[in-house]
Image: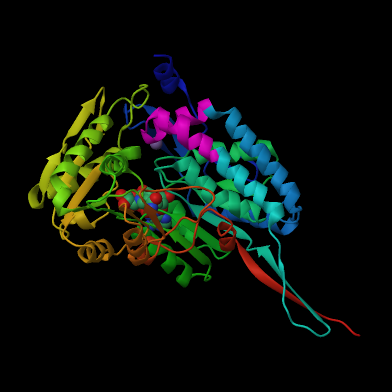
Amino acid sequence: VVRSRIATEIRPEGRAFIGGGFVSARGGEVYPNYNPATGALINEVARCRAADVDQAVNAARQSFEQGVWSRLTPSERKRILLRLADLIDANIDELSLLESIDVGKPLLVSRDYEMPEAATYVRWFAEALDKLYGEIAPTGGTNLALIQREPVGVVGAVTPWNFPFDMAIWKCIPALGAGNSVVLKPAEQTPSALKLAALAHEAGIPDGVFNVVPGFGAETGEPLGRHEDVDCIAFTGSTEIGKRFLAYAAESNMKLVWLECGGKSPNLVFADADLDAAAREAAKVFYNQGEVCSSPTRLLVESSIKEDFLARVVEHARAYAPKDPLSADCLLGAMVDTAHCDRVMRFIEAGKREANLVHGGRRLTIGASSNFIEPTIFESSPNTVVAREEIFGPVLCVIEFATEAEAIRVANDSIYGLMASVFTRDLDRALRVARALRAGTVGVNVTDQISPLVPFGGVRQSGNGRDNSLHAFDKYTSLKTTWIKYSN
Ligand code: NAD
Ligand code: MN
């Protein structure tokens, strides 16, 4: 009750964050941001356009050239980012409640997972900064060729709505850590990164170094993607829009474009697997309302165990009955907004026509909102729409296979290649299949493992480049060689 009252009374800042402070959009326009689980207005958000993007990019450029951040030592930047991590911890209750009402996700997910992770990622990147060494080339003679990493300059980050705070951190913290200045455009549904900028400012990040311009894709994202003074774009979102950023770069200044796009990750379960553990993992597809790019949405099951295994997965799916996201036992909340809920339901209706509905499939009304969808399981051939397209909702598609070769062929028959997993007790098979699967990450007897310690990203139309691990810094730095000739 207290949570619901706070949730309706909380009024987060909705103005843009440019040059070290909150400002309205130049045109004075705002748009409403609703809680999808109740329909209540959360706040009015600055509707930024090209002029605001310009202002933010100029602030970023100026701060970069002045060196107020870019020329600090890595240890100094580390100290400030560690302070930011502490501030995230100190504000965890407010941040997680905000994230829950903004996205419609269970408060538990944001409170116990997303926000603690956020601080962990910031700390991990911060700690890395003064441990990254350059190289000296083996030229020999009276030469000294230094190979150093330098920041690329102004980084534009464009992020999605499913993990708004974490995605902003995955992009912005390594970019900032490397010494760049950043302009972030969060998804219009979830402008919560405004709070991240305010905390970063409080931690000591200088004015102009970290800017946030909320707004719509075509009005804010496109001018950022086409900006002549942006050196690099880091994007997470759909494959369709990822391709547009490649076009924006080609048609403007050839900026770097790093893409983390869609997925339809296959999860292969062989008859010899620990079926209990595999079923529990398979049901994690419903985590975060299924609004996860890397989630194991294609469940490939060996024919001999299909009936038994499906029954176990259905059992686990029951735990994900949609509930009020603020309730203590909610594991599955509301879809992010009505338009997305409609889109997921259209997929489900298509699935009912061309595949076999095993579980769920209905849209539910809870309280004042009809943005809830039951965990839904289809059994299908590999060639239906539900088996091939990224749905981004609580929908699992089960496909049976007879042989290992068939499983690999079906698994790889996709435009995507973000994640994959295989469940078996046979070590030879596990390694053979893991090698054959085309994906950025393959889980063996586990799905969707994500950590700051390992790279995250895909092959094919799931994107390029990697978030997380030390490789994240590759995207936001360029190599500079300084060749020094000296005399004997
Ligand atoms: P999207 O790709 O449309 O949006 C991602 C970001 O790009 C947002 O900040 C958005 O405002 C911006 N954007 C949208 N159109 C743009 C344009 N023309 N120019 C510049 N920027 C633009 O994704 P979405 O609409 O939020 O979701 C649609 C689908 O994308 C989902 O159903 C899902 O399949 C996929 N998706 C994937 C991820 C992921 O993590 N890979 C996250 C969210 C959504
Ligand atoms: Mn919202």
What residue is rendered at 38% in x and 48% in y?
448
**Residue that lies at the very extreme toward the left in this rendered image:** 353
Front-most of 251 and 284? 284
Q: Position of residue 286 (x, y in %)?
A: 29, 40
Q: Which colour style is shown?
A: rainbow
Quadrant, the C terminus: bottom right
Whether the magenta-drawn stretch holds residue 95 is answered as yes
Does 1 appear in magenta?
A: no
By secondary structure, the bulk of the magenta-drawn segment is best described as helix
Residue 333, image x and y in percent? Answer: 32, 32
- Residue extending furthest top? 1
Q: Residue 269, percent across and down?
A: 25, 51
Q: Is residue 388 above or below residue 377?
A: below
Magenta residue span: 93-118
Quadrant the N terminus occupies: top left
Residue in the foreground of this view, choosing between 200 and 177: 177
Q: Is residue 410 above or below residue 270?
A: below
Q: Write the residue at 28% across / 40% down.
A: 283
Q: Residue at x 70, y 40 (%)?
A: 204
